[in-house]
Amino acid sequence: MKKTAKIIFSAVLVMLVLATMIVPGFAATGSITITNSNDAVSMNGHTYKAYKIFDVTYDAGKTVYDYKIAPAFKTYFESLNLPASLGEDLDARAYSYVSSISGDAALQAFAKQIYNYKGDAAGSVTANNANSAVISGLDNGYYLVYDEGNAAPGNNAEKAIANIALTTTDPDATIVLKASVPTIDKKITGVSNAASNAASATGEDAVSATVNQHVGFQIDSIVPDLTGYTNYTYKVSDTMSDALIPDENAKVTIGSDDVTSSSTIVYSGQTMTITVPFSVLSTYAKDTPITITYSARVSANANVYPDATGNSNEATLEYSNNVDDLTVKETTPPSEVHVYLFSIDVTKVNDKDEKLEGAKFVLKDSSNNYIPVSLVSGRYKVSDTLAATEANATVISDSNGKVYIDGLAEGTYTLTETEAPATYNLLKSPVTITITATYDADGNCTGVTGNAKTVVNKAGGLLPSTGGMGTVIFTVAGIAVMLTAVLLLVVKRRKEIA
């Protein structure tokens, strides 16, 4: 499963095509010039590296272009599972996909994803002044340009940020370092039995949970470059699925400061909006981390795998994007996470594989706690209202020998039989079931194992015991034998006397 990035970085995408076709043996002569017109930002000491995403060739008239994925990024495009409708092969599909991306925020999100797949840099330069630097000696190509920051940055915030831009196909391309584009990254910090808004340095894109547990969330962002702004919109919207009930405990921090009371937080159904005012943002340096933490309780409305999309939840950020027109705003692509719930599927049979109705079990978790359930449409589902008692944790096999229990997280559970079907023996040991799920890099569940089990009961009928009918039969038989022996002895003696 993929991990969320711990650093805030920005990238610049540059389409760079030289004036002639690539010819083996020709020296690479293309270049990318990076310029800076913002007096509040200095490029001096920052190292810029270019990573080739596509090799590009074209005809002499620059009317036909051919794009080939650079080897380092092939795995990334394969992971997207791009549809055949985008092109006849992976190269064509990748070109169609990238060419359809528009807007600073969407390009920034793309660059952030693809950066994790980069190989060796095709070229680099360390700026020796505040406003310009040139990466030279580049082949034809479409490049990702990344600002590595100062030679020895004191913290991640010192890594400079630039807007993403697309240039022309001139052999000497130019990109302009501009104000930063804020991004957000939502992750799940954990699952517990109580509400929590604690921050975490790690997180997941997907977790599993049981009904009534609390899922912790964290949204990471940064203070944008506010140079020239007299006001600024910074509004996070978080939309939860119907499966989650907000604990309404959102906490907002900038750096190490709690600014919750200075922010506007509104809860409306499954949506939470958090607005941090310009008066607060402007007191912090550009790139200072912004962290929003909160939790939500899993309700009995939660969908259960595989009939769900993982109870997906997403967050977006609306922000100002024009210093000269404060009405111009942009919204980041959604950052999405998933909360999965699973089922137990038990089949009760005899030693002839005949289905058995009426077997009673008590459900417990790995800590020996009762898990209360309700029967809904022939299936049990973990309850978010019933108390955790033995009676409420009891399930019974139906006429098909089935016991379905929905709404459980991954983990180990026990079903202890408390009453066997009529004429059958009670199981001596609890039935143990361990649910295990697998996920892909984007947090989508790809399968679950261990949640189905067949349980066998053997027919009743007790062996004889002391005082039982068997003993009576043997006792009567023994007396009869003794009486016969005595009778024979008496008859024999009478014959001898006669």
Image (tube, rainbow, N blue to C red):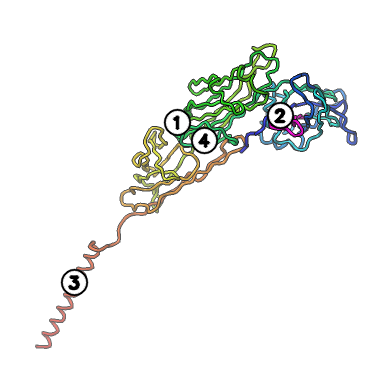
Q: Residue at label 1?
A: 299
Q: Earlier in the sequence, mark 1 or mark 4?
A: 1
Q: CA distance from mark 3 to mark 1?
A: 71 Å
Q: Earlier in the sequence, mark 2 or mark 1?
A: 2
Name the kind of residue labelled 3 in the image: Ile
Q: CA distance from mark 2 to mark 1?
A: 42 Å
Q: Earlier in the sequence, mark 3 or mark 1?
A: 1
- In this rendering, is residue 212 above or below 34? below
Q: Nearer the viewer, mark 2 or mark 1?
A: 2
Q: CA distance from mark 2 to mark 3?
A: 103 Å
Q: Quadrant of the C terminus?
A: bottom left
Callout 4: few (<14), some (14-19), or many (20+) C-alpha neighbours within 10 Å?
many
* Magenta span includes 294: no
Q: Earlier in the sequence, mark 2 or mark 3?
A: 2
- Helix, strand or loop for disc 3: helix
* Magenta span includes 147: yes
Q: Residue at label 4?
A: 340
In the picture, the disc for residue 479 is 3
The span shown in magenta is 143-159
Name the kind of residue labelled 2 in the image: Glu
> Residue drawn at (60%, 23%), measured in percent from left and top?
316
Q: CA distance from mark 1 to mark 4?
A: 12 Å
Q: Residue at label 2?
A: 158
Q: CA distance from mark 2 to mark 4?
A: 38 Å
Callout 2: few (<14), some (14-19), or many (20+) C-alpha neighbours within 10 Å?
some
The answer to whether 60 appears left or right of 209 in the picture is right
- Helix, strand or loop for disc 2: helix
For this orientation, the residue located farthest to the bottom is: 497
